[in-house]
Amino acid sequence: MFSTVLTLFMVIHSPSEQRKEVDDASLQPQKPDENANASSCDSRSARQKEVGNTSSSDADLEKRILLDEITGYVQEIPIGFKFKPKDHVIIGDYLRKKVANCPLPIPSDMIQDISASDFYKKHPKDIVTDVLDQREWFFYIKRDGIKFEDYKIREVVDGVGNWQPLQPFGTSKSSVQDLKGETIGYKLSFRFFRKSAESSKRTHWKMDVYELTEQDTEWAMARVEKGIEYRGE
């Protein structure tokens, strides 16, 4: 099985293009150490040496999977699999490690770094990587002093649109719990509306922003999703 920090979906190539979720309940992530440091980041290095280094071009898939299981770090995602982490994994395994300056457990190109000011300067279609059939992207957002408030409407530069919160007025951001039921962070959801001189039009772009419980940290994380009915708006 793959690393404990990934929930992967395997695409089964059939006429109906059915998908099967790969999620081993026996390999569940544990709550991250609140005081993670460089030494804890490297705690698996000794076991990694038992297998040896494996390049991303290595054709021996079994060896790569074994290395991933031992180190907890994915060297590359095989063809047919997708990066599809759950909320508690996003916060506990990816955002927590980014804030603690630990090595990230996935290939570096899976989550892009971007400043909050740059993120809100553009229409979402202009910040994502255009890959065939891809509908979901992940970002580490450097706050630049910007707070993700519950009801704040985020205007996009030149008046092309804005991100409007999906939380009903009077409710707070959603808390995210680990497998023990303890709150490890928060999630806020937004929908992108395209503006014109006459009206504001709802699009199929959606964003979830994730924060640690310590909300004064330098980084937040975002999942940007393009809806299935998206037609280029």
Image (tube, rainbow, N blue to C red):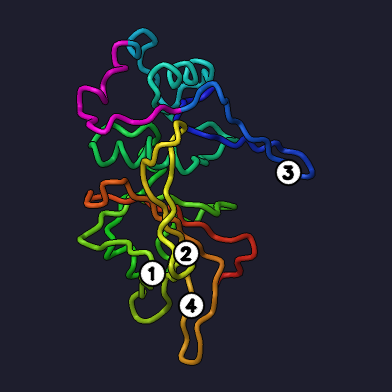
Residue receiving disc 4: 194
Distance Cα–Cα, label 1 vs label 3: 39 Å
On the image, which quarter does residue 107 sit in? top left
**2 or 3: mark nearer the eye:** 2
**Which residue is at the front of the view, 199 or 45?**
199
Distance Cα–Cα, label 4 vs label 2: 19 Å
Secondary structure beneath label 1: loop
Which comes sooner in the sequence, label 4 or label 2?
A: 2
Distance Cα–Cα, label 4 vs label 1: 18 Å
Residue receiving disc 3: 17
Q: At label 4, which amino acid type do we have?
A: Arg
Which numbered circle lies on residue 151?
A: 1
**CB atoms of marks 2 and 1 within 8 Å:** yes
Which numbered circle lies on residue 167?
A: 2
On the image, which quarter does residue 39 sit in? top left
Q: Is residue 91 above or below residue 223?
A: above
Secondary structure beneath label 2: loop
Q: Indicate the position of residue 118 as horizontal and vertical percent values.
A: 29, 64
Magenta extent: 29-46
Which comes sooner in the sequence, label 4 or label 3?
A: 3
Q: At label 2, which amino acid type do we have?
A: Gln
Secondary structure beneath label 4: strand
Is the stretch drawn in magenta largely helix, strand or loop? loop
Distance Cα–Cα, label 4 vs label 3: 32 Å
